[in-house]
Amino acid sequence: MADAAPRLHAIVEQLLGGPLPMRIRAWDGSQAGPPGAPALVVRNRRALRRMVFKPGELGLARAWVAGDLEIEGDLFVAMDLLSGLIWERDEDARPLGQALRDPVFRGAVLDLLKLAGPPLPPAPPVEEIRRTGHLHTRRTDRRAVSHHYDVGNDFYGIVLGPSMVYSCAYWPHPGSSLEEAQRDKLELVCRKLALKPGQRLLDVGCGWGSLAIHAAGEHGVSVVGITLSREQAAHARKRVADAGLTDRIEIRVQDYRDVTDGPYDAISSIGMAEHVGAAKYLDYANDLYALLAPGGRLLNHQISRRPQQDESTYHLDGFIDSYVFPDGELAPLGTTVTQLERAGFEVRDVEPIREHYALTLRRWVARLEDDWTRAVQLTSPGRARVWRLYMAACAVGFERNRLGVNQVLAVRTPESGDSGMPLRARTWN
């Protein structure tokens, strides 16, 4: 068989109802598609079986993670081309999976599979996590967080750099270093919270301790940092000790629902609320509100998604849920603000910074690619491929406004009505 690529290209264009702006290169050496465009390299017949038995994003992801599919050419350009075909289809358009179940299209694919090997569904890659039990219990949240974060601190060091700061940086300009931009993000959070010496800060989802160390070292506050990842906590404690801040920083392996030692003067939640889930979000907001002293500030830094015409159709069944953030749920910005207000917070400022996350992700991808061999040795080829795809696809998602990220500053305003906020909030006094 020496015509796999032209036949595949024709099938895909049938499914899309229009031209495919990428090349296809198949295992038999054949190629098809526009010259000079990035190529989707189908390395073996198993890739086709993955896409037939699990049509859509997840089938493609399984083939990528297993090494059955590869991108030849600029990965970001390829993700940009695929974004409009897979993730940004109109809500009323026929989903790709539904198209593949159409007898005409499915018949064409099955004809090809007859030449491609036994029509048996391949097992998912070992890096895929299966959802079990109810969402967002303490047990399932621990499992989900461990899947994402307990893949080795040295691996994260490759991606994030020496600062070990996760979530997006805050870029003075595109030419800044990653370290400069991450330090600016930490300082921005501290200024928005108006931290002062002697205050208590609760850092929910403290990661590897970067914000806690910055807040204690530069602003003189006492910090309690909580995480569900034991690997993160161990690394954070070592960094705290190395910085000589053990008298001001306590790192706990603890669920936010189990924190009872309030009140705190300020709370930071940076890239953690995506793990909470829609059904639990108001409880999360209520818990943080109860832990704040009157007049205390919350800085909630959270990824958002664009709202859908029919929110009831939003579901978790894709690449990110199966390989990156199990049980993670994104909400539109308006939903998040409403839930915070329902809990009693006065929302005082919302700063959208999605372009900053796109810049950050591109730097992370570059770091991973530059040290690819070591990253594979520290984890697995499949895990490294998960992270490369995840970060590149998300960078394009932020650039195309499919994803957003927002810093929401909210206050537990006392009954007197004195929020303690400056008249011109963006001075962050």
Image (cartoon, rainbow, N blue to C red):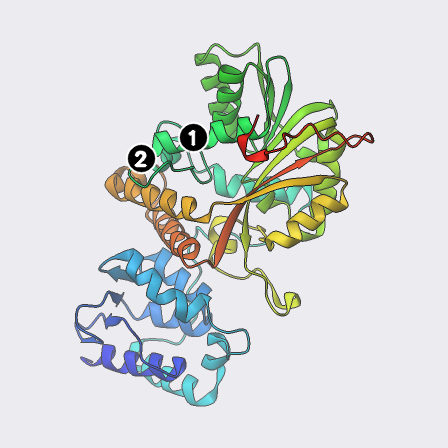
Q: Which residue is mark 2?
A: 176
User: Does 394 sit left or right of 28 as displayed?
Assistant: right
Residue 35, percent from left and from top = 17, 72
Question: What kind of residue is marked 2?
Answer: Ser
**Quadrant including the N terminus:** bottom left
* Foreground of the two, 425 or 300: 425
The label number, if any, that marks residue 152 in the structure image: none
Q: Which residue is mark 1?
A: 184
From the viewer's perspective, is residue 373 above or below residue 199?
below
Residue 307, percent from left and from top = 59, 62
Q: Residue at x 41, y 59 (%)?
A: 400
Res. 286 in view: yes
Number of residues whose C-alpha sits closer than 10 Å to that of mark 2, classed few (under 14), some (14–19) or many (20 or more)? few
Question: What kind of residue is marked 1?
Answer: Asp
User: Does 276 sit left or right of 179 as displayed?
Assistant: right
Q: Are marks 1 and 2 in contact (CB under 8 Å)?
A: yes
Residue situated furthest bottom in the rendering: 104
**Quadrant including the C terminus:** top right
From the viewer's perspective, is residue 160 above or below residue 353?
above
Q: Quadrant of residue 183?
A: top left
